Image (tube, rainbow, N blue to C red):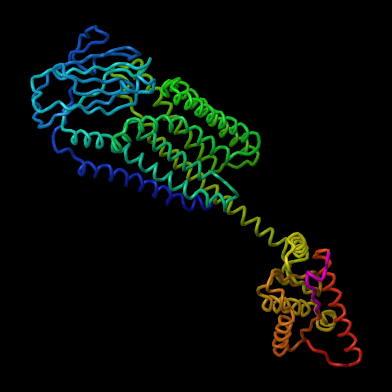
Amino acid sequence: MKLWNNHRFSRILALALLVAAIWLLAESSTQVLSPGAEVISLTSGWNISKNGEQLPTDSLLDANIGVINHQDVIVITRTIEDYGIVTPCVSLYTSHTINDAYVDNVQVYSFGRDYFSRNKTVPKKNNYIPLGNDSVGKELKLIISGTRDGATSGLPNILVGERGTLFSYEVIRMRYDFLIGLFLIALGLILMVLSPYMAIYHHNDLRLFFSGLCSLLLGIYNLSYYGLIELMCDNSLINTISEYSSLYNIPTALLGYLICVYPGKLKKVFKILFAFNIMVFLTVLILCVFSVSRISDFTGLLHTMAISEGLLSIFVIFYDYVRKMRRTGKRSINSDVVFLIGILLFTFLSVCDILRYNYEKYLGKRGEGYATITGFTFGSLALVASLLISYLLYIIYNSNVDSMQSRIASLAFTDPLTGLANRARCEQVLEVLTEDHNNYTIISLDLNKLKAVNDSLGHHEGDRLISGFATILSDCFWDANLVGRMGGDEFIVVLTDDRALNCTRRIHELYSMINDWNRKEQNFQYSTSYGYAYSYEVPSGSSHEVYMLADSRMYEMKREHQSREAKGVAGNA
């Protein structure tokens, strides 16, 4: 938590800079994409009828059309005026309706009838209807036909201008949604590309993958809801598929993240919900592919699932945090708290948008076309930011835990006097050697005259003799798989593969280093007995038996040293 406190200001500053950058980019885009000619909103001057019944208003905003169901037909007409535009074009954004346009009863545009005839969902559509250069004074008739119950509601905003001007106008009007959507998509792709690396080096943890998937899906939905994907690729079907596919799978991606966070029973609950969501999506997909139903028919089910699972997730996260807080007695900003704040904010803003959407669609005068998802957009940013900060806190915590565990393991398997591997670690290595069945050599060494140094010079000098000999071994066998102290004056060296082949030469190097140290030492002299054995000398393949063979050969040398000393014959190191 100290790291969080130390860097909290810099994190807030970075977030503020990111928001400022998006704002500056959005504002500067108005200069780059500024329409070269005027865009006129045709909100009044219409004759409006629904199912043959004339409405008493000429305003699209006050028509109060209500919900447009299957077989409902809305007809709006007006006289085309001189708008001062060379090649005038009318634009309107419609949702799941068949759209036909006539100029003096000559059809100039049609959309949606082919989808409807094949029992497919009629996509949302940015309709651009050319009026022609000689359309002034002629009658423009727009016919909007519902393709299913609850297809849409209200009348769309109708604009007139040149085609390129209308396109620029739409991009500028929705520039914040456009930039935020692109940012979330780019961030999601980057996180998903990085996730395999992080999973490998962080215990197969997939939090980063699901964080990236959430960001990607949120960005795609943000763009497709407003038809921005269609504006970019001029394909309304791709826009519709993107919208509903992302909307169905955002809760699934969040559940995937929760599966990575929570253990035990909670993990099982989230796994069940995760599998249920995938099953629902696949079922809907199959029904749509085989033209049994349309994907838009399940919007109500999707809203219910999303709200229910969001509230359940919030309850579970909050309950788990309170339980941990009571158990530990600590109130701290950990990864769970950050995630809880993010999902609370996202769920609250999304639920507000869902309620506002349904109000505009079923109760509002203007209709569905005027419902926005501004709350969802900024809630998406908050959620993705919380996922990333939560993941960073989790990594920091795990790094601290891993570091602590590493220090504990180091203390558990390190000889405190020499810094070499202790007996427990040496036993572990011997077990591994037995299991791997590789070629290796074990050298058993005994430090001569340790007792004499302890008795004559004291244990302090004896410890210096041991630590000095350990340094000699480490320097000589720098490439060994193991240099360890079995206890007292007994040491072990393990060499594998090519390093194990020329053991005699390595022993000569050891003796040479001992002689160098002895020339500099005034209080005592280093001396060792050794024995080594190759793995192929023991048919059973047991490393312990190889070690015992090397140890027995070491004792043979030690007895020779003792015999020479008894006879007064000088021995080598």
Q: Does the magenta segment cover residue 113?
A: no
- Name which residue lies at 39% across and 42% down: 185
- Name which residue lies at 71% across and 82% down: 505
Q: Does the magenta segment cover residue 534?
A: yes
Q: Whole-percent x and y of residue 426?
A: 76, 65
Total numbered labels = 0
- Horizontal side of residue 398 vs 230, given as left or right: right
351 and 128: which is toward the camera: 128
47 and 350: which is toward the camera: 47
548 and 425: which is toward the camera: 548
Q: In this rendering, is residue 32 above or below 415? A: above
Image quarter in which the C terminus is found: bottom right
Q: Whole-percent x and y of residue 210?
A: 50, 41
> Which quadrant holds residue 363?
top left
- Name which residue lies at 39% across and 45% down: 186
> Which quadrant holds residue 42?
top left
Q: In this rendering, is residue 153 above or below 492? A: above
Q: In this rendering, is residue 94 above or below 461? A: above
Q: Whole-percent x and y of residue 97?
A: 31, 20
Numbered range of the magenta stretch:
530-539
> Which quadrant holds residue 158?
top left
Q: Whole-percent x and y of residue 537?
A: 81, 71
- Horizontal side of residue 391 vs 180, given as left or right: right
